[in-house]
Amino acid sequence: MTQEVPELATPFLVAICKTLTARIRADNRRLRDSINVARASR
Amino acid sequence: MGEQPAQEVGYKIWAVDDVVYGPVDMPTLVEWVKDERVLADTWVFTCHKNKWNQAGQMGELRTVFNAVLPGSIPVSHTPLIAGIRPGSLRRVKILGEMNDQQLGRFAQFMEVENARQFHTIVKQGDPGDAMYLILEGELRVRQMIGGKETVLVTLMAGEFFGDISLFDHGPRSADVVANDHSVLLKVSTANLQRMTQEVPELATPFLTPSSSKSPQLTYNV
């Protein structure tokens, strides 16, 4: 699809990127919270 | 009697991004050959002869090519982009699947940014509207937690950051500070949107490796 109909593949890929973005944001929040907890427990 | 139109002088260069640059004078053309922005197989239009020739076939450039690479003539394409060293784009991993022509056209949607040492390129909490590709230099990604600096990762040439904000326009999750003088390519949200609409065949190779990379938290500022 990316080779034959890029005009179709591109919005699909952008949508996937946005979904991944949301997941990574959530992971980042968890990472930050875990660092805070680890520091607080020292 | 009407005035004769002024005859154009100099040289025009048909670059791999399908854009004709110029006219430029001979010293500039020689500089571009030395910088490998013009290669032996680059088409050059000689205005006063009204003729296209490949640069390697032009007698006036023969000695320059021989001086650049004695005994051989380079044949690979290099994008003609002001301010970017030839081959620099090749260092960026996510551009690795693009061919030379795509790279040249892709570069038209980017801006070059120079960051001096200790300059903060993105600041935690600021709204993000661009990602950055590192062409030269070294940067650190840091978070200030409890007043202390936590360095999450050090980024080198060929790596990139800020890609998350490119898609959700959300706040930056960390600071990115230049450890050394660095040269960056900025891809803004507006330019990415323009690229996906105007040249989707160009946006696709850019999006594909990005979407398949493993989520490394520290890169995604």
Image (cartoon, helix red, strand yellow):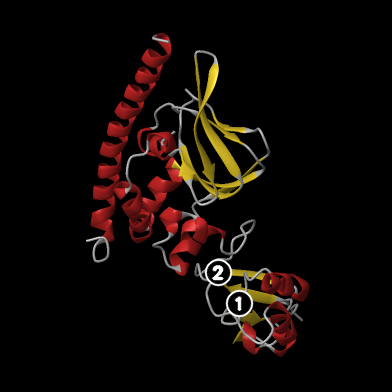
Q: Residue flagged by tag 2: what amino acid is it?
A: Thr
Q: Position of residue B6 (x, y in %)?
A: 74, 76
Label 1 SS: loop
Q: Position of residue A35 (x, y in %)?
A: 40, 19
The C terminus of chain B sits in image quarter: top left
Tag 1 subunit = B
Residue at (47, 39) in percent of width and height: B130
Q: Position of residue B187 (x, y in %)?
A: 48, 46
Q: Nearer the viewer, residue B119 or B23?
A: B119
Tag 2 subunit = B
Label 2 SS: loop
Q: Residue flagged by tag 1: what amino acid is it?
A: Leu
Q: Which mark is residue B184?
A: none
The N terminus of chain B sits in image quarter: bottom right
Specify whether B49 is left or right of A37.
Answer: right
Specify whether B201 is left or right of B105.
Answer: left
Q: Earlier in the sequence, mark 2 or mark 1?
A: 1
Q: Which mark is residue B39?
A: 1
Q: Taking B70 as reference, is B218 above or below it?
A: above
Mark 1 and mark 2 in contact (Cβ < 8 Å)? yes
User: Residue at label 2?
Assistant: B78
